[in-house]
Amino acid sequence: MAYKFVDNYRERGARKQLVKHLEKRGIEDKRVLQAIGKVPRHFFFDETFWNQAYRDIAFPIGDGQTISQPYTVAYQSELLHVKKGDKILEIGTGSGYQTCILMELGADVYTIERQESLYGRTIQVLPYMGYKPHFFLGDGSRGIAEHAPYDKIIVTAGAPFVPEVMLKQLKYGGLLVIPVGDEKFQKMVTILRVGENDFERIELDTFRFVPLVGDQAW
């Protein structure tokens, strides 16, 4: 695949239009919108498909994975209420686009990917773009216990249930955002840890993610 890292007025203009579109769809967090407007999403596309980069759609990136649609990225990012310096665990690095948005919001990101080919690309591309998260290759459904606890955890694939191991890796007052359901549709769920074994759960809108695969998933 051929990638070309050029960001000119055409792409910047397309991002401005995307931001306006997301505002119309109900995204209100100005910091999230600014991040969407800054990160060059077309860098994650083969240049053959650049015309797809700023459409509000998910798009295949290989190995059965997709780069999430911008609305979904913005929606999950808004739910996280990211504060500068937040230690965030991202389950499913994928293309790395969501990772970049979190870092634009000031997060210290620990991101894990199980697909070796995707991992191999992101560890090269993201630092080239100026983003240096903590990269891990492995089964994200189990979290990354050795670096816990986390202020926030975001899961970017559809899970059949909420893995208890992830809940235990949250700080008290920490927040988990995860899509939960069957292999076709999931409800976005937020879970706030308020005590040792005390959690507050809210179910929100319906989405469609690729399946979360692993020991604590499909």
Image: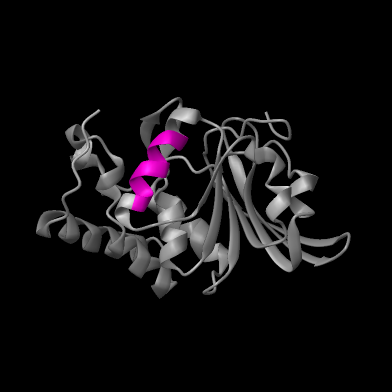
* Residue found at x 19% / y 56%: 14
- Residue 38 lies, in percent from the top left, at 29, 63
* Residue found at x 41% / y 65%: 104
Asked if the magenta segment contains residue 30, the reply would be no
Name the outermost residue toward the top: 63
- Residue 91 lies, in percent from the top left, at 59, 45
Q: How is the image coloured?
A: one colour
Asked if the magenta segment contains residue 125, the reply would be yes
- Foreground: 59 or 139? 139
* Residue found at x 12% / y 56%: 8
Is residue 112 shown above or below 173?
Answer: above
Is residue 43 shown above or below 20?
Answer: above
Is residue 160 shown above or below 127?
Answer: above
Q: Quadrant of the N terminus?
A: top left
Is residue 54 shown above or below 20?
Answer: above
* Residue found at x 19% / y 37%: 47
In the rendered structure, which segment of residues is drawn in magenta?
119-127
- Residue 171 lies, in percent from the top left, at 74, 65
Q: Quadrant of the C terminus?
A: top right
- Residue 79 lies, in percent from the top left, at 56, 63
Q: Quadrant location of residue 140?
A: top right
Q: Quadrant location of residue 180?
A: top right
Tag count: 0
Residue 80 visible to an observer of this rendering? yes
